[in-house]
């Protein structure tokens, strides 16, 4: 290939790369578009590595389990509302959480997933806005729909998407139960006074005593909101109707400002009854805030409805399997299987809900068929609250207007409880923004010094040819930078301190390929070839060595990337990337430039090229030399 | 040539160092060093970073006072939270963003760490946002090491395959043997000097693999070239040809090593000099030590080992015998030939190979048909093929 053509290819690559940098998925000012994605050790942030272990046999979890575990963790982390939170799996057992730019306590996200089945006792609005009248509760009203019949699912009127409440029926094979779908009417909830149910308002007799530490924290919250507000909240027997009582609204206002952690320590009755406590706060309570099966708790569904829930009678560990399946009517449903033990508990829970025994469920909380609902609570949120359509003694189905995706998600969430995975915090790193910036500057400084040293050496040893090295290093740096920006955006590659170190190390690789080439060239010239013929000959021979040597560096980078954990990955990726780009520069820049250089006269002058020093030997014919031996 | 200094001869690849011939010396030295390294592993062990023992570290800005102040405050915070541990080590670390103090403690639970951090912030009168903290469980270091060993094994297996395809199995064995020597010696230096081993060290350790082989590939490439078609004539033994290759590529190896060490030196300078601790220093140090060792092992172990292995190849064995035979004959004046009877390299061959001088001399008494006088060869110490043309004997011209 002609040198001009190779340079044109390089130019093309360069233009395409930088078009990608500026226009592919980029936004903001020119400066923003040029920003590579930096790791949190460079901009500050929190990074936690959790090791997942199969709690049954102590081995690494299966890939499937690990992915499900990652999803749980991700949903917990997303509850923080950090924009660039990232939760990824690493190797066969690690889950890495990074929160760039944020220092947060992530101690709790690694708690085991808590799946609970709780009967819904009461419902209220979860908007949390003081002005909002609780009448807007979207809880479906109780309608006396026939239940227990063998009506096939989905036989009746189609339900409007998005508003249908799911139902639990027994699987068709069970031959029991059924459902009567109907669009839930959005009738206003009866007024607060009407729903006041003394039995539910008082803490359940079997509730565990509150631990002392919680008592202390409650005191702190009490001080924060003020005694008046606390007493007003304590006096509530039902969700207060603030529109009816503006003075109460004023009193309860401080509750709206509590942090999720503070809300978590409040008694369940208070969390439920104080309308200023919204789902926004409830959803972000620390994980495991409501995992105690013996307590009544408050939780939200879809961030809108707030429910008071009974003790958990069935736990996630009672579920043996959950799958999204198509039923006979071609609708997506979630089938639910229980373990032997769990089946008994599930049957008694459904009996209780179906017959409305025990802790009575309130009229606000009934399903559209007038039966109690059972909430599936994952961590702090209700993922689904199907109405119970019968006493379920066998496998059950949750029906509703599910898409395949909805059904799979729900099935996945139900399986979480059965997920035999526990997490252990392996590594936690909290880097302040100042320290991060300091790291970044140090890394760049090290890269600068490294590059400078290489260039000085190149000029010292190869004289003018050093400028070729200089130019190709600059070119490599520009390519690497462009690739970093693009890869950061497209595949989420983040540059960490270890990555910068990888880049610096790759400078050596890049410079090495010069040395190999130039030393070859020196050999050729010493043998008496003219520069014009020496360049292509040296190139052909050096090429082989360069490719083998770079292949080995690349091999080590790939192996490191695939098997390693932690910051090694970033290092290996950077090293591999820089090595590949070095090959591009070697083939498309250095060789054509050298070919062009060889046509100039200055090339051979010892003062200019550093290669001429090989010449004098040739000029002394008396010197006994055997050019063949030098041939390389 | 004699009037040139060593530097110039090095530059031109004519230093004429007898490296392959002294292989017993190199192997001996390498063997003793490897033994010392292994003894050091078992007796002294390594000084492991907190990542392996498990522990916490807190980094507070130096603006809070002296290092002793910071330590006292952290100790009181540790006591206040009933952790029952004390600060283990303290260190002042620099950085372009301002100095800070790093205080390490034995492992705390996540809750304790959070509480201690809040307490330190309160005691020192700074915001908790200004404190960086790190927590590593005991299992983390072993997980990193476990993966690193796995990576090492996979890499060596793959590189064996690659080298066998690219060169041949003897070269692959020699290259990997020198690689392993390199790793053992580097680890030995770490153990003896007592440098701290962190997961970053292990990363760097794995990266040396690539570099150590880089040098070996450069030399072997030349050896392969010099010995292509070597059996077609009787001038050089394999050892001599490979020794020549080393000499010719010595400058190249030296240059690639220097050039690769320069940026790592920059890394080390910033990491150790400016920052005082952390990823950059750990990486820089292990790469620097490893790459320096790699330069030596690639020259002093890899190629001599290759020559040794090659000498057991029946074809090469026969060839060496022929060369020595011929030299024997030349020495007795039966055949006009090389000035020197045998090069030092060849003598080494003669002593540790199944080709003994007597046999060679005996065989030499009856010159082979077709043995022909070589050209005038004043520089007999180094081999070379007769004739001057540009054609390579015994092999297709490589393109």
Image (spheres, rainbow, N blue to C red):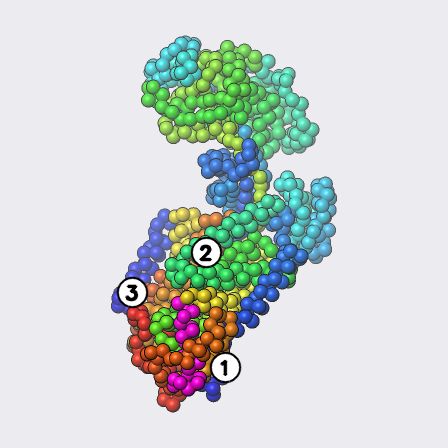
Neighbour tally class for label 2: few under 14, some 14-19, many 20 plus, Cα within 10 Å: many
In space, the residues marked 3 and 2 are separated at their CA atoms by 29 Å
Find residue A556 and name its label. 2
Image coordinates of residue B362 in percent, x first then y, are 44, 78
Q: Nearer the viewer, mark 3 or mark 2?
A: 2
Subunit ID for the residue under disc 3: A
The residue sitting at 40% across, 75% down in the picture is B322
Examine the rendering and report whether any part of residue B349 can be seen: yes
The disc placed on residue A6 is 3
Label 1: element kind: helix
Instruction: Specify which label sits upstream in the sequence, 3 or 2.
Output: 3
The verdict on a common chain for dots 1 and 2 is no
Q: Which residue is mark 1?
A: B6
- Residue A56 drawn at (x, y percent): 55, 32
**Among the 4 quarters of the image, the one containing residue B31:** bottom right
Assess whether mark 2 and mark 1 are in contact (beta carbons under 8 angstroms).
no
């Amino acid at each position: 290939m002609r040198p001009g053509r190779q340079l044109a290819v390089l130019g093309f690559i360069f233009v395409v790369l930088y078009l990608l940098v500026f226009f592919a998925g980029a936004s903001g000012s020119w400066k923003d578009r040029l920003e590579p994605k930096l790791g949190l050790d460079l901009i500050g942030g929190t990074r936690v590595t959790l090791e997942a272990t199969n709690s049954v046999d102590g081995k690494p979890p299966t890939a499937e389990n690990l992915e499900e575990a990652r999803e749980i963790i991700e949903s917990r982390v997303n509850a923080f509302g950090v924009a660039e939170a990232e939760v990824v799996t690493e190797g066969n057992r690690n889950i890495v959480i990074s929160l760039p730019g944020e220092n947060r306590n992530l101690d709790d996200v690694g708690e085991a997933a808590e799946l609970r089945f709780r009967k819904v006792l009461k419902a209220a609005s979860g908007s949390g806005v003081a002005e909002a009248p609780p009448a807007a509760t979207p809880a479906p009203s109780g309608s006396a729909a026939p239940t227990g019949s063998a009506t096939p699912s989905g036989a009746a009127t189609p339900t409007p998407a998005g508003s249908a409440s799911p139902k639990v029926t027994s699987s068709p094979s069970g031959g029991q139960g059924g459902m009567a779908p109907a669009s839930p009417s959005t009738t206003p909830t009866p007024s607060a006074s009407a729903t006041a149910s003394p039995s539910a308002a008082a803490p359940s007799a079997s509730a565990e005593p509150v631990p002392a530490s919680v008592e202390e924290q409650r005191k702190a919250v009490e001080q924060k909101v003020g005694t008046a507000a606390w007493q007003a909240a304590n006096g509530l027997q039902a969700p207060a109707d603030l529109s009816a009582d503006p003075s109460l609204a004023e009193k309860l206002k401080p509750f709206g400002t509590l942090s999720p952690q503070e809300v978590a320590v409040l008694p369940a009755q208070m969390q439920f009854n104080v309308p200023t406590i919204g789902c926004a706060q409830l959803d972000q309570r620390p994980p495991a805030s409501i995992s105690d099966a013996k307590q009544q708790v408050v939780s939200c569904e879809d961030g809108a409805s707030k429910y008071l829930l009974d003790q958990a009678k069935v736990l996630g560990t009672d579920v043996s399997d959950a799958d999204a399946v198509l039923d006979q009517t071609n609708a997506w449903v979630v089938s639910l299987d229980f373990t032997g033990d769990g089946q008994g508990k599930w049957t008694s829970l459904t009996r209780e809900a179906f017959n409305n025994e025990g802790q009575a469920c309130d009229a606000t909380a009934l399903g559209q068929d007038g039966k109690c609902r059972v909430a599936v609570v994952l961590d702090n949120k209700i993922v689904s609250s199907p109405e119970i359509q019968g006493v379920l003694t066998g496998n059950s189905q949750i029906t509703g207007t599910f898409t395949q995706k909805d059904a799979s998600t729900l099935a996945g969430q139900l399986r979480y409880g059965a997920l035999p995975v526990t997490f252990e915090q392996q590594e936690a790193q909290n880097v302040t923004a100042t320290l991060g910036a300091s790291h970044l500057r140090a890394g760049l400084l090290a890269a600068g010094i490294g590059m400078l040293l290489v260039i000085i050496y190149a000029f010292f040893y190869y004289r003018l040819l050093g400028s070729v090295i200089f130019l190709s290093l600059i070119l490599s740096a520009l390519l690497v930078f462009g690739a970093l920006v693009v890869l950061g955006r497209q595949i989420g590659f983040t540059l960490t301190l270890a990555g910068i170190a990888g880049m610096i190390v790759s400078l050596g690789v890049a410079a090495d390929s010069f040395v190999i080439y130039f030393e070859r060239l020196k050999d050729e010239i010493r043998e008496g070839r003219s520069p014009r013929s020496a360049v292509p000959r040296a190139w052909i021979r050096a090429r082989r060595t360069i490719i083998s040597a770079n292949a080995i560096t690349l091999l080590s980078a790939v192996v490191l990337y695939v098997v390693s954990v932690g910051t090694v990955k970033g290092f290996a990726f950077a090293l591999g990337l820089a090595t590949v780009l070095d090959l591009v520069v070697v083939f498309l820049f250095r060789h054509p430039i050298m070919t062009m250089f060889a046509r100039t006269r200055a090339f051979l002058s010892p003062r200019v090229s550093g290669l001429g020093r090989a010449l004098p030997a040739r000029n002394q014919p008396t010197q006994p030399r055997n050019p063949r031996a030098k041939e390389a | 040539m004699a009037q040139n200094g060593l530097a110039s001869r090095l530059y031109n690849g004519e230093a004429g160092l007898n490296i392959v011939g002294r292989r017993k010396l190199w192997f001996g030295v390498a063997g003793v060093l490897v033994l010392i390294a292994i003894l050091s592993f078992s007796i002294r062990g390594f000084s492991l970073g907190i990542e392996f023992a498990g522990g916490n570290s807190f980094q507070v800005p130096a603006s809070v006072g002296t290092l002793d102040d910071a330590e006292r405050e952290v100790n009181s915070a540790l006591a206040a939270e009933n952790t029952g541990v004390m600060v283990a080590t303290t260190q002042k670390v620099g950085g372009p963003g301002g100095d800070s103090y790093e205080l390490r403690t034995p492992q705390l639970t996540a809750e304790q760490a959070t509480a201690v951090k809040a307490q330190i912030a309160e005691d020192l009168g700074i915001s908790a946002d200004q404190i960086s903290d790190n927590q590593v469980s005991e299992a983390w270091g072993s997980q990193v090491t476990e993966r690193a060993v796995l990576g090492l094994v996979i890499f060596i297996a793959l590189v064996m395959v690659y080298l066998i395809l690219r060169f041949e199995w003897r070269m692959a064995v020699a290259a990997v043997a020198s690689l392993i020597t390199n790793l053992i010696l580097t680890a030995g230096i770490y153990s003896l000097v007592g440098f701290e081993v962190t997961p970053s060290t292990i990363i760097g350790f794995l990266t040396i693999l690539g570099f150590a082989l880089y040098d070996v590939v450069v030399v072997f490439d030349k050896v392969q070239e010099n010995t292509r078609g070597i059996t077609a004539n009787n001038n050089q033994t394999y050892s001599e040809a490979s020794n020549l290759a080393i000499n010719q590529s010595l400058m190249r190896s030296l240059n690639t090593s220097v050039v690769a060490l320069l940026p790592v030196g920059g890394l080390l300078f910033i990491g150790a000099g400016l920052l005082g601790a952390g990823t950059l220093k750990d990486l820089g140090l292990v790469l620097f030590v490893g790459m320096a060792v790699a330069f030596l092992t690639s020259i002093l172990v890899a190629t001599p080992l290759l020559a040794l292995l090659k000498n057991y190849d029946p074809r090469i064995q026969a060839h060496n015998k022929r060369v020595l035979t011929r030299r024997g004959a030349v020495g007795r004046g039966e055949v006009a030939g090389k000035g020197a009877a045998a090069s030092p390299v060849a003598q080494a061959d003669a002593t540790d190979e199944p080709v003994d001088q007597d046999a060679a001399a005996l065989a030499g008494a009856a010159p082979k048909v077709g043995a022909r006088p070589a050209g005038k060869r004043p520089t007999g110490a180094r081999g070379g093929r007769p004739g001057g043309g540009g054609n390579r004997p015994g092999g297709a011209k490589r393109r």
